[in-house]
Image (cartoon, rainbow, N blue to C red):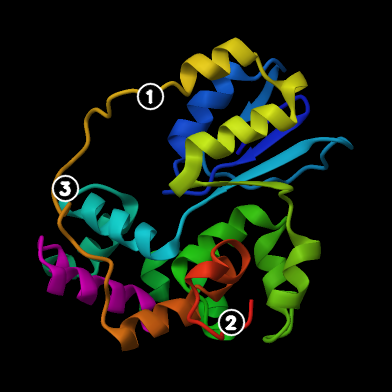
Amino acid sequence: MLLFDGLLYLDVQKTGSTFVTAFLQACCRRPQIHYHQHDRLRSKLPAGTVRVISVREPLAQYRSLFRYGLDGKGGLYHRLKDAGLTEVYQPTQEAFETFVEILLQPETAPLLHDSFEPVARKFDMGMMSFRHLLLAVKWPLATLKRLPRDGLVAAYPRLRLWSEALRQEDLVADLQALVARHPDLFDLEAAEAFLAPKARINRSDRGAELSTDLPAPLMARLLQREDLIYRTFYPHLLPEGQPT
């Protein structure tokens, strides 16, 4: 979580949050009040605060996590290592699909987050939706415990903290639009310079050839478990005829 006077950023993991944080710290005109990476909001915000969250298509997040683990990095890699599951980290499509299957199993939930299992079982929820909700809703664990099993989708619009969303797939364009909507918050020249095209550095190529074209049953399960994110931010990726 990154908080300025008048601006809150909820930095969900693996959604371009490092880039967004650097942009805001370089370009926001307002004084920074607090920063704790991937932390939750626990205090009341002043009226008028612009509340921003970053999101990413869940399947792309699974792929990114898998590629990160191929380099032996990340908290998830070490949790799976402790559970004796690191043999899944092979740079093959079959291994990636097995990785997705493992993460979608409710039995794996305790390995992914200490508080995830009851939420995963109650709402049939995937890891990416859970990570999102930890930051998108105030007092998320208590809130999810209180909600009925079938009440999350209907309640989410009134429970969410954010008013603006940045999609990792269109991050530069969405940041430019954010600046245009709130010019009083940003140094416009600094924002333009920061968002100018740059060469990407220190990018790992391991797993770059992995496809997100999963077998139909596995993809259907992923869509079901990550329904909240797809329904809210990526309804165009839902199967034709599925309600949004």
Q: Position of residue 129 (x, y in %)?
A: 53, 66
Q: Secondary structure at mark 2?
A: helix
SS of the residue under disc 3: loop
Q: Would residue 180 appear left or right of 122 to someone viewing this image?
A: right
Q: Which residue is mark 1?
A: 197
Near mark 3 (Cα within 10 A), the count class, few <14, some 14-19 or many ≥20, is: some
Taking the magenta stretch, the answer to whether it contains residue 170 is no
Residue beneath disc 2: 123
Of the two numbered discs 3 and 2 on the same chain, state the one appearing first in sequence. 3
Q: Farthest right residue?
A: 47
- Left-right relation of 164 to 195: right
Residue picked out by circle 3: 71
Residue 30's place in the image compared with 205, above or below, is above
How far, Cα to Cα, is label 1 from label 3?
27 Å
Most foreground residue, 92 or 69: 92
**How many numbered discs?**
3
Q: Residue furthest front?
A: 240
* Identity, as a three-letter code, of the amino acid under mark 1: Pro
* Segment colored magenta: 88-107
Residue drawn at the location 66% of the way across and 42% of the way down: 52
Residue 64 higher or lower than 110, as above or below: above
Please state which of the two labelled residues, at mark 1 or mark 3, is closer to the viewer: 1
| Mark 2 neighbour class, 10 Å CA radius: few under 14, some 14 to 19, many 20 or more | some
